[in-house]
Structures are given as structure tokens and as C-alpha cells.
Image (spheres, rainbow, N blue to C red):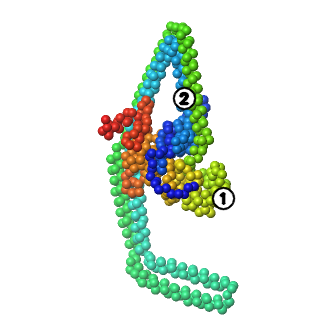
Amino acid sequence: MATKKILNNDVNYNEKVLEVNNLTKHFYVGVGKNKLTIPAVDGVSFDVYKREVFGLVGESGCGKTTTGRTIMKLYNPTQGTVKLNGKVIGAGYADRLKRIADIKKEAKEKLLLLNPTKKQIIDVRHRLETDLALREGEIQMILRDKLEAEKTIKHQLIEYQKAFYELNNDYELDIEKIKYEFEIKKTEILQKTVNQSELEYKKRLNGLKHTFKKKIEGIKDSAALEKEIINQRLDQLNIDYESKVQALKTEFQVKIKEDETRIISKEQAKLEIKKLLEIMKSDIATRKEKYLDDKEKLTVPDKSKSKNELKTLSEKTKKEIKDIRQKISILKKEARKQILEISKNAEPLNNNSKSDIEQIKKWEKEQIELEKLKIKELKNDNSSKEALTHSRKMQMIFQDPISSLNPRMTVQEIIGEGLTINTSLTKEEIKEKVGEVLELVGLNREYATRYPHEFSGGQRQRIGVARALIMNPDFIIADEPISALDVSIRAQVINLLSELKDNFGLTIMFIAHDLSVVRFFCDRIAVMYNGKIVEMADSSELFSNPIHPYTKSLLSAIPQPDPDTEKNRTRIQYNPNQHDYRVDKPSLKEIKEKHFVLFNDAEFKSFQESQGVK
């Protein structure tokens, strides 16, 4: 590990360390017709520049960790490319396989078009597919409108239930408070019927007697002392005891006399308690009256009306969908009828058509071979020796500092493993480098002989940092390195990474869901949702001017240290159904310099109009 400090640690936006282009990672579950495709990462693109800390944030399950692991080559990308220092180290080819399927489909359609009869049949089928897609879209819109209408109908009932619960809860708490205050005052009155100083005196006196008795028993039971010494100590003990008793009497004598003047009779106490009881009952009655009054003011929703509205809405939706299904059935019947009529008037192929068939088949073969050659090149990029060598300049700090360290290896073996495998250094040289990097992350050299279970969580994470640094990487992926740590330890690890970044000009991709940490540590931030980047900007710009609804939702969830502010904080709920991406697909669009937001064309146009941009 090079420990020479750099003179300039500013971000160099002219030099790209990492380039991620259309990175996609799909996981597949099941086989055949039951096969499901899970798009964990879906078309992510971004660059990370020299000495930059690039933050990747989002809720659990958004795909940020999968993105990091795919870049790190722990997963093979489904599609897209990853470049480190300008060299491709990972690439997917799912789009090339799709292109081969499209070529076959296109060739098949061209062959069919040579036959006028089949061309007409294809046209009929295409029109049918378009019509069916539109009808299915109408059904989805009807279902979406039904959900929104149901929410509106149920909203009044939910608000009533919420207000009723709060009213009941406040009433019960107030009643308990009145009863509690009554018991406190009742106890104070009962205490006035006895001399409290006298009770305290007797308690202290009993304590002295108990201690005196124990000491006497201890002296008498001592076999190591002579009888004369025992008698002397007993005499001295009696003198000390009498002295302490006398001092206690003197201390409490005046207090007891003063308390005698304040003692009330039991009859008087009963009268005062009776008055308190009447006040308590009056307070409870007043509070109950207010509760009943507030309860009457609540607008009770008509449940039967809401039920009928929901029933009517459900019947209306079913009828509308049924009508569309009938239209779909009619369209299919008409299409079948047209195809039958076209088939009756089929025309034979001519010699020119046969020549065209050969040309189409030749074109298909050439295009498929070209795509296969590209796939072979991409596979080579993934597994070539050059790509593997380049990828070693990238290291990862894992989320869990416990499971990421082998419990059967010493710290020396864990940190030095990369050097052992990839270099020809001797054991002594590796031991020296491990010692240097341990000191660099704030640990003693002596820790090298210990095992992971002998360290705290924060120390384990420092070992993980050391393991990454020892390979002298150009780029580090920190995958939620503080999420499993206590708050105080988190600060230590973040400060360590910040210090290392400043001292050695490290380039870091910092994956996290703690926005307050990301704001402090990162130069630029990308927000992920459902496998896509929805917004990307400089840290200060993102927090001061969030645009995407999901970003606003995330920022509204950040807790505030001020209790008053936290009490009145309004949480913004993100509803993905507010976007209509069925036809007009979204992409990252630059709304201002270095600030990108996921918009489709309609959303982008609406945003520009709201900003007064034509």
C-alpha cells in the first residue's frame, strides 16, 4: 500500500475512473412457462471521476448492492458494459441474443411477405395485435381508476376511525392522570396522620441495632482472638453503639417535636380525602362530558352508503371490463374471418420469389454470424487475462463486518490474501505491508495474529478497509460499510474513510440508505428505485432541489434532531402509479448542468413548462 500523501485531492472531472453504460442484471426463477425474470438492475448508466466519492442511495431492495456486486464482477452482467480506467472489465450480451431472435423474426416476416396472401394475413394479425394491446390498456386504466375511487370512498371512514381512536386515547389518558393525581394527594394526607420523623428515627435506630448485633456476633465467633481482647472490643463496641444512639436521638429530637405540631387526626384525614374524592369525581365527570361532546362533533360516515358505493363501483368496473372483453372477442372473430377469406384467394409463388428467398436466408445467416462474433468478443472481455488484471485495481468493502471475514483465518492471512495470490512478495514483505496498513486504519500491528471474533464490529470493519487498501486500488466500492454498526462506531468508520480519501485521493462508490451520511461524505449522489436511477446530481443540489417524487419521499423521511420539527414533519408518500410509462418510456434527462432526472417525454415537457422553459 502506497502511503505517500497526495497534494491535490479535488475531483478531476476530466478523468473517468469508472464508466457504467446500460448495466442490467436480471435473475431468473423457474423454468419453461413458469420462468420469471426479476430485473434487479435495469439499464443503469453513470460515470465516476478521479478522486470522487459517488453515492448510490435508495431503500432496501432497490438494486444498489446488486449494482455494486455486478461492477465488482461477483455477478455477471445480463447486459451493458463496465469500464475501469477505459478498459472493459465486464459486459453482458442479452441484447445481442435478443437481436438474433429479432433477426430470425424479421427474416421470417420477409419470407412471408414474398407471398401476397401471407402478407395480407400478417397485416391482419398486426392490426389485431395493435387493437388487442389498446383494449388491454383500457382495462388497466379502468382497474387503476377503480383503485383510486376506492381510496376516495374509504378515505372518510379511515379518517373517522383515526379521529375516534385519538379521541378515545386522549380521554383514557386524562382519566388515568386524574386518578393518579388523586392517589398522590391521598398518600400525602395519610402521611400527615403519623410522625414521619419518628418513623425515620425508628428506621435508622433499627439499622444501628442490626449492625451492632452483627458486629458482636462476629467478635464472639472469632477463634483467633483471646478472651481478654474479645471483651475489650465488646466494651468498645458498646461505647460506640451508645454514642451513635445518643447522636441519633439528638438529631431527631427537634424534628420529632416539630412534626408533632403538624400531625392531623385520622378523622380530619378522612374528611380531606373525601373532599379530594369528590373533586376527582367532578373532574372525571367534566372530562367525560367534554369527551361525549367531542364525540358528537365527529362526522360519522354512512357505512351503508360507502358499502353501496363500493358495490356500485365494482359492478360498473366488471361491466366495463366485460364489454371490452366482448369487443376483444369480436375483433378475434373478425380477424379469423378475414384470414379465411384471404386464404381462399391464395396466389402461387413465381420464380423471382424463389430467388428472393435465397437472398433473405443468406442475409439472415450473415447477420446472425455477426452477432455471434460480437457475443464472443463480449465473453472474452469478461474472462480475458487483461480484464482480470485491470479488475484487480478495484476493491470492495462489504456490508457485514462479521460474515465478510473468514473466522478460520488470522487478520494477517485475511488482509494479505490478495498479495499472496497476486504477487511474488515474501512472507516477511507481506507481513510488513499488513502491519503498515493496519496502522493506517487505526489498529495495532500486533492485531495481525488475532482472529476476527476477537474484535468489535468497528474494528472488524477497519480490517475490511485494510484488506481493500492493501491492494493499492484505483477504485473502491463501499457497500453500506456502516449499516451494521452502532451510531458512534459509524462516525469513526466514516471519518476514517474521509481521512483516507483526502490523504490518498481515493475514488469511492459509497452505497448506503442513510441520506444524512451520504450528504456529508459524497460529492455526487444517484438515487435508485426499483432497479433504475431516478435522479442524479451533486450532493448539495440534490438536497436543496430534489425533483423526482421518490427523491422527495426519501428526503422527507430523514429524522430531525429538533423534537418540535420532528413532531410536525410531514412524510411524503411515493406512489409509482402516478407515472404512465406504458407507451412513453422514461430516460434520464438533464434538467440543468449535472442534474439528471428520470422523465418520459410528457413529464419532461410538463416540468419545463412549470419552470417557464419553452
Label 1, residues with CA under 10 Å away: few <14, some 14-19, many ≥20? few
Residue 395's spot in the image, x, y percent? 56, 49
Q: Secondary structure at mark 1?
A: helix
* Residue type at tag 2: Lys
Considering every residue shown, the one lying at the far right of the view is: 223
Q: Secondary structure at mark 2?
A: helix
Label 2, residues with CA under 10 Å away: few <14, some 14-19, many ≥20? few
Residue 542's spot in the image, x, y percent? 40, 47
Taking 498 as reference, is 552 left or right?
left
Is residue 325 visible from the viewing direction of this image? Answer: no
Q: Which mark is residue 98?
A: 2
Query: Which residue is at 46% across, 19% downward?
Result: 127
* Residue type at tag 1: Glu
**Closer to the camera, 513 or 569?**
513
- Between the residue at mark 1 and the residue at mark 2, the CA separation in whole angstroms equals 53 Å
- According to the picture, the residue beneath numbered tag 1 turns out to be 428
Query: Which residue is at 42% across, 45% downward?
Result: 537
